[in-house]
Image (spheres, helix red, strand yellow):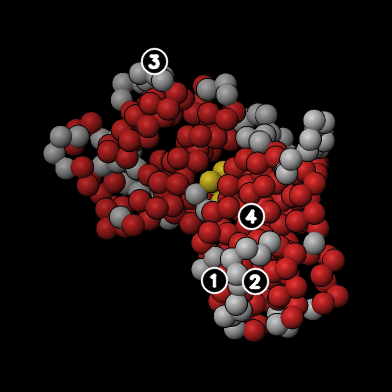
């Protein structure tokens, strides 16, 4: 079942201009549970010992055991009789936003990978929603409630601007994946993971590494000779020299390494404050630059 367009939601969307990060509303939790039922299937106690391909028991057992192990718990909830009931109860009752996001991230990563690969078993497990539809619905539900997170490439990432996310962050991930920039993609996702967890210095460092990896990868893919010691500045100059990017944009592209050098390298005895909006700017700048660089590369390959 798709998302119904009703007036109350449209009206609320018009009022929301700032994302929230410290709350997961109860209606959103219930909507996530509905997606779980449709996209993952349910726990079948009658078939538990006979045919694991006809139920989602193994999947829910794995989710429950994995999170219990990480948190040092014997069970996620005292309310349930089995893994799925404990997971559902945890989703509804857990007070920690980070832990709620943990279980959402883990379950949707499984939907995105394992369940996607096992299409032949969907009917037996009672799965009625395609993985892409489930992920799109989750992200839409986050937006509807004004919650500043999205599921992207296996991780829950923090979103500070919906427009920038749609126009820069998401296209950057798609381009890196589609064009084979694996290392840069991993570094870019790590940057967003650090940012979500409040590790701002690490976020700036990883964003700078992702930017530099894209520069190096483009040079490698275009057979531009490197010594292996080049940093962002000389790499930008090499791409200009080889007519991949125009010279007049050199200063614009230099913003990323300047930000990294200013805030992420040794600061001496006095720590330089790093406002959150500066970190968000660095991640958005990284995404914009990556989109530009890969699109420019595509015209030359």
The residue nearer to you, when weighing 237 against 247, is: 237
Residue that carries the numbered disc 1 in the rendered image: 179
Among numbered discs 2 and 1, the one appearing first in the sequence: 1
**Residue at 71 percent of width and 51 percent of height:** 283
The answer to which quarter of the image holds residue 236 is bottom right
Among numbered discs 3 and 1, the one appearing first in the sequence: 3
Q: Nearer the viewer's eye, disc 3 or disc 1?
A: 1
The residue nearer to you, when weighing 122 against 218, is: 218
Among numbered discs 4 and 1, the one appearing first in the sequence: 1
In the image, which disc is placed on residue 236? none
User: At numbered mark 4, what does the secondary structure look like: helix, strand or loop?
Assistant: helix
**Residue at 39 percent of width and 25 percent of height:** 68
Q: Nearer the viewer's eye, disc 4 or disc 3?
A: 4
User: At numbered mark 1, what does the secondary structure look like: helix, strand or loop?
Assistant: loop
Measure the alpha-carbon separation of dots 2 and 1.
8 Å
Residue that carries the numbered disc 4 in the rendered image: 209
User: At numbered mark 2, what does the secondary structure look like: helix, strand or loop?
Assistant: helix
Mark 4 touching mark 3, by CB under 8 A?
no
In the image, which disc is placed on residue 294? 2
Residue that carries the numbered disc 3 in the rendered image: 78
Image position of 42 (left or right of 99): left
**Residue 12 location in percent, x, y?**
75, 41
Measure the alpha-carbon separation of dots 4 and 1.
18 Å
Mark 2 touching mark 1, by CB under 8 A?
yes
**Residue at 41 percent of width and 48 percent of height:** 111
């Amino acid at each position: 079942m798709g998302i119904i367009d009703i007036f109350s939601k449209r009206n609320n969307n018009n009022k929301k201009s700032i994302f929230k990060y410290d709350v997961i509303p109860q209606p959103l939790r219930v909507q996530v549970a509905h997606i779980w039922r449709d996209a993952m299937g349910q726990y079948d106690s009658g078939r538990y010992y006979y045919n694991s391909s006809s139920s989602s028991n193994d999947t829910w057992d794995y989710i429950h055991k994995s999170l219990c192990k990480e948190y040092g718990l014997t069970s996620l909830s005292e309310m349930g009789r089995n893994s799925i009931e404990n997971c559902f109860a945890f989703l509804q009752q857990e007070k920690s936003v980070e832990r709620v996001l943990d279980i959402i991230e883990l379950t949707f990563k499984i939907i995105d990978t394992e369940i996607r690969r096992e299409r032949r078993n969907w009917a037996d497990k009672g799965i009625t929603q395609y993985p892409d539809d489930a992920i799109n619905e989750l992200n839409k539900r986050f937006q509807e409630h004004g919650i500043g997170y999205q599921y992207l490439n296996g991780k829950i990432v923090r979103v500070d601007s919906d427009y920038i996310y749609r126009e820069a962050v998401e296209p950057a991930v798609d381009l890196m994946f589609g064009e084979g920039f694996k290392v840069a993609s991993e570094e870019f996702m790590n940057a967003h993971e650090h940012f979500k967890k409040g590790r701002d210095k690490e976020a700036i460092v990883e964003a700078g590494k992702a930017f530099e990896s894209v520069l190096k990868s483009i040079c490698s893919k275009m057979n531009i000779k490197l010594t292996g010691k080049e940093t962002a500045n000389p790499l930008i100059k090499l791409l200009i020299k080889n007519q991949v990017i125009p010279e007049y944009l050199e200063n614009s592209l230099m913003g990323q390494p300047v930000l990294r050098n200013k805030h992420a390298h040794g600061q001496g005895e006095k720590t330089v404050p790093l406002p959150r909006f500066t970190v968000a700017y660095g991640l958005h700048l990284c995404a914009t630059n990556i989109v530009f660089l890969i699109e420019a590369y595509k015209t030359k390959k």
